[in-house]
Image (tube, grey):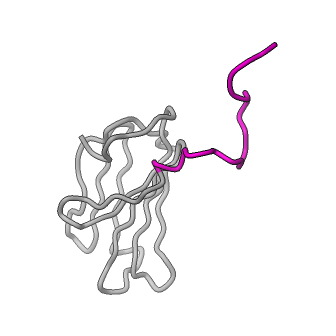
Amino acid sequence: MMGGKGGGMGGKGGGGGEDKDEVEKAAADGKYHWQQKGEEIQVRFPSETALTKKDVSVKFKRASLQVTVQGVIMLDGALKGTVEVDECTWCLAPGGTELQVMLTKQSEGDWASLMQ
């Protein structure tokens, strides 16, 4: 008899208490909020004014991230883990009041923090 948990790359199923990583965490300086779910991390940068694509610069690297909004560096430094650069993206929320950055981890596992 095979014991243990079900195998494979399951889709959306009842994870039974595994949503502790889905709690959104705020940066110490309050500039952004982030949360992780599986291999994905979403970082949100709220804005008091409506942003356009020209206002935003996001530079993805395997182990670091730089986010600049309207010439102000919001985030710049080493990530807690590594990401798949080709699978990372960003977008503006409807109305431009929030920048959303999506990161894909190279390997699953919880990050204790977003940055080192």
Q: Is residue 70 left or right of residue 87?
A: left
Q: Is residue 111 left or right of residue 86?
A: left
- Magenta-colored span: 1-21
Q: Is residue 50 above or below residue 88?
A: below
Residue situated in front as seen by the camera: 31 or 78: 31
Look at the image and tell me whether residue 87 can be seen.
no
Which residue: 71% across, 49% down?
A: 12
Extreme residue in the top direction: 1
Q: Is residue 95 above or below residue 107?
A: below
Q: For residue 6: magenta? A: yes
Of the 4 image quadrants, the one containing the N terminus is top right
Which residue: 43% across, 81% down?
A: 96
What kind of secondary structure does the magenta stretch mostly adopt? loop
Q: Is residue 57 left or right of residue 102?
A: left
Look at the image and tell me whether residue 106 can be seen.
yes
Asked where in the image residue 101 lies, by quadrant, the reply is bottom left
Of the 4 image quadrants, the one containing the C terminus is top left
Q: Position of residue 51 (x, y in %)?
A: 37, 80
Q: For residue 9: magenta? A: yes
Q: Position of residue 20 (x, y in %)?
A: 46, 49
What count of labels does the image hold? 0
Residue situated in front as seen by the camera: 85 or 10: 10
Which residue: 68% across, 22% down?
A: 4
Residue situated in front as seen by the camera: 108 or 88: 108
Q: Is residue 46 left or right of residue 11?
A: left
Q: Position of residue 105 (x, y in %)?
A: 48, 40
